[in-house]
Image (spheres, helix red, strand yellow):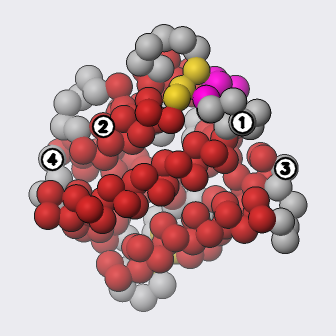
Amino acid sequence: MLSPLQIKKQTHFYKILDFDRSGTIERDDFEAIGENLCIVRDFDMDTPEYETVMGMTSGIWNKLVPFVEGDQGTLEQWLQFMTVLLDPKNEESYNKYVLNFTSTLFKLFDLNDDGYISQNEYIDLFIGMRIEVRFAPKAFKNLDDNHDGKLSQDEVLYSVNEFMKSSNPSARGNWLFGGWESDED
């Protein structure tokens, strides 16, 4: 069962995934996110990089499909999907899913392959996912646990886990996808 805070954060994430702002999520939303991320990274179609990004976003949709009636997913279906994914009985599936998602996302936005995501690289992620960029500096600052001006893969993974699992309103990982507090219920 998701806590009220988890529901609020997952609702925020759902709204990000609803790329066309139709009120439902569908395969086209995930393809549009993938294409937008490729544009930000300057990945041409028919390249391995493009295929990796499109595979990542398609994979998210494919995991959601069993919870979707028809071709469109509602917020209620998304929350059910997250309830199942976050159930402690599904820890192995959660870890595999989250580790894969996080490592792919990290590699995608570590533009200079230095093993870290800079604030500018993080802003590119916000642009690619059409998250309000004005939240990126605050989000980055919250996620940068050791205050060194860059995000390590461990910091990103920790933040993803906090975003998904934490019911603490002060958890730094809550800021992973920007201003979740500003979303209306």
Task: Say if mark 4 contacts mark 2, CB within 8 Å.
Answer: no
> Where does the image place residue 34, in percent across and percent down from the top left?
66, 61
Q: Which residue is mark 1?
A: 113
Task: Say if mark 3 contacts mark 1, CB within 8 Å.
Answer: no
Distance CA(mark 1)–CA(mark 4): 37 Å
Most foreground residue, 145 or 10:
145
Residue 29, which numbered label? Answer: none
Q: Is 120 in the magenta?
A: yes
- Closer to the chain start, of discs 3 and 4, is 4
Q: Secondary structure at mark 3?
A: loop
Q: Label 2 sits on what residue type?
A: Glu
Task: Say if mark 3 contacts mark 4, CB within 8 Å.
Answer: no
Distance CA(mark 3)–CA(mark 1): 15 Å
- Closer to the chain start, of discs 4 and 2, is 4
Q: Label 1 sits on what residue type?
A: Asp
Q: Which residue is mark 2?
A: 162
Q: Which residues are magenta?
A: 116-122
Q: Is residue 51 left or right of residue 87?
A: right
Instruction: Residue at the far bottom: name it.
Output: 70
96, above or below 8, in the image = below
Q: Label 3 sits on what residue type?
A: Asp
Q: Which residue is mark 4?
A: 3
Q: Secondary structure at mark 4?
A: loop
Q: Which residue is mark 3?
A: 42
Most foreground residue, 5 or 100:
100
Q: Is 139 in the magenta?
A: no
Q: Residue at x 52, y 70 (%)?
A: 59
